């Protein structure tokens, strides 16, 4: 009898090993804890299972999992690869370890073209597409996920991913449908809860969004890193309703949406709080400070979206010198888009923290055309919009700031934006009617 993974792909291992392997993959896909420990069991149970060893190498590269990537790739090549998709998967992992994730990206796209039922291969392909800074990366990732859904049938992870894609392009009705169905299939999966949180945020339903998160999160895996990203979502709702204390209370527990841990989400929340006056500029109530965590990425980032948060982390410390050094270094970074995008962002933030808001506005406006391509969700990128608006206000360009705020308010209600717009309009009148 052919042994298969949870989505029907044939795998070259014993049935008892397949159960552990399947549990590891499901934990990973739904962002639950224990995935690495389960994969370690797979490697120990069956050292000759090629896909298991290749997965260990892959997780070492993408997740800093405690495996030796080169050792695992060598073992995978020597291991059992009885099916075409396994041979393709092992080859793609080998290319990733030996040549780097970006050089291996065409191999992963080709793997998905040939084997759309391999959802682990799909996840690598869509991750690379969504952080590649290519203009069509998000659309291509969504197309590929939809193709895999056609192959494997209803799957909570795929439905959640499609919900995220839908909300990010503004189709909140479709996003809600995908999220609801994902949660029906797996009520505590972060892959369904994540797009639901975004639907509440993007629709401006902050009170109900906060209530939903506070009711749903306690029933999820409390050890899972990704749960901390949903805490960040709760903090955004607090900010939107004007509750700075509530947002800061969430700050120590937020962050961890993707590789980078607290350096993802933490800096953007803290920077928002500083912009709004909820905490003084340059302060960080948690140790280690996010600006200290950023120091490890001054000489390079694996993808530009993480680099954005490195720059924000340095800004939270008011570290203009560090931001300029990061900008200079970024001009030589290999990650797609980094050499073009990050210097503009970091230089703009350096001017902002030094109080030269006119210069900050100019630099950030030059960066702005790239912002939609930097990766992450609209909710994560919105901090960049916030920064531009605050720079314009502080530079006295009040009409431009007001126009941007009205556009945002046309998209959704926001007590925060309404209040800032009222202040901006009052400032315009004060200038026009001295």
Image (spheres, rainbow, N blue to C red):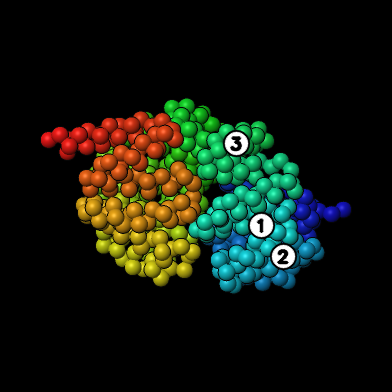
Q: CA distance from mark 1 to mark 3?
A: 25 Å
- Horizontal side of 19 relative to 368 (left or right) equals right
Q: Is 352 placed left or right of 195 in the picture?
A: left
Residue 74: x and y in percent read 67, 72
Whether 417 is drawn above or below 229: the answer is: above
Residue at x 20%, y 34% (from the top left corner): 429
Instruction: Report the residue marked by disc 1.
Output: 121
> Label 2's element?
helix
Farthest residue toward the front?
432
Work out whether mark 1 precedes mark 3 in sequence or the reverse, and give the earlier one.
Answer: 1
Q: In the rendered view, does 118 fall on the left or right side of 167?
A: right
The residue at 87%/53% (across/down) is: 1
First in sequence: mark 3 or mark 2?
2
Residue appearing at x 35%, y 60% in the figure: 344
Which mark, by number, is residue 88?
2
The circle on residue 163 is none
On the image, which quarter does residue 247 sit in?
top left
- Measure how far apart labels 1 and 2 are at the Cα level: 10 Å
**Cα distance between the residues tagged 3 and 2:** 34 Å
């Amino acid at each position: 009898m052919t042994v298969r993974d949870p989505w029907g792909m044939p795998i070259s291992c014993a049935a008892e090993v397949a159960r552990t392997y399947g549990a590891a993959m499901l934990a990973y896909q739904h962002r639950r804890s224990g995935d690495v420990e389960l994969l370690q069991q797979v490697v120990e149970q069956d050292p000759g299972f090629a896909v298991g060893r290749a997965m260990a190498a892959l997780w070492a590269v993408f997740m800093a999992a405690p495996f030796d990537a080169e050792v695992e790739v060598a073992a995978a090549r020597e291991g059992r690869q009885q099916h075409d998709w396994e041979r393709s998967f092992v080859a793609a992992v080998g290319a990733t370890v030996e040549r780097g994730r970006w050089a291996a990206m065409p191999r992963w796209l080709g793997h998905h073209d040939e084997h759309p039922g391999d959802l682990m291969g799909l996840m690598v392909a869509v991750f690379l597409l969504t952080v590649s800074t290519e203009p069509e990366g998000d659309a291509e990732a969504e197309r590929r996920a939809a193709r895999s859904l056609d192959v494997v049938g209803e799957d909570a992870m795929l439905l959640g991913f499609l919900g995220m894609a839908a909300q990010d392009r503004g189709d909140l009705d479709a996003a809600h449908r995908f999220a609801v169905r994902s949660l029906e299939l797996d009520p505590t999966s972060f892959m369904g809860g994540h797009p639901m949180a975004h639907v509440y945020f993007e629709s401006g339903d902050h009170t109900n969004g906060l209530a939903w998160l506070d009711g749903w999160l306690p029933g999820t895996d409390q050890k899972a890193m990704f749960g901390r990203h949903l805490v960040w979502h709760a903090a955004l709702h607090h900010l939107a309703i004007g509750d700075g204390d509530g947002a800061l209370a969430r700050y120590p527990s937020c962050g961890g949406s993707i590789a980078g841990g607290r350096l993802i989400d933490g800096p953007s929340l803290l920077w928002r709080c500083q912009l709004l006056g909820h905490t003084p500029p340059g302060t960080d109530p948690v140790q280690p400070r996010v600006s200290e965590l950023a120091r490890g990425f001054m000489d390079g980032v694996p993808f530009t979206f993480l680099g954005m948060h490195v720059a924000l982390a340095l800004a939270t410390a008011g570290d203009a010198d560090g931001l300029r050094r990061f900008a200079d270094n970024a001009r030589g970074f290999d990650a797609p888009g980094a050499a073009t995008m990050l210097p503009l962002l970091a230089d703009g933030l350096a001017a902002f923290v030094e109080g030269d808001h006119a210069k900050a506005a100019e630099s950030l406006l030059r960066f702005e055309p790239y912002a939609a391509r930097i990766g992450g969700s609209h909710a994560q990128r919105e901090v960049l919009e916030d920064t531009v608006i605050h720079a314009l206000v502080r530079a006295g360009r009040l009409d431009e700031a007001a126009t941007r705020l009205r556009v945002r308010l046309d998209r959704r209600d926001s007590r925060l934006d309404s209040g800032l717009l009222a202040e901006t309009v009052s400032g315009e009148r004060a200038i026009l009617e001295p």
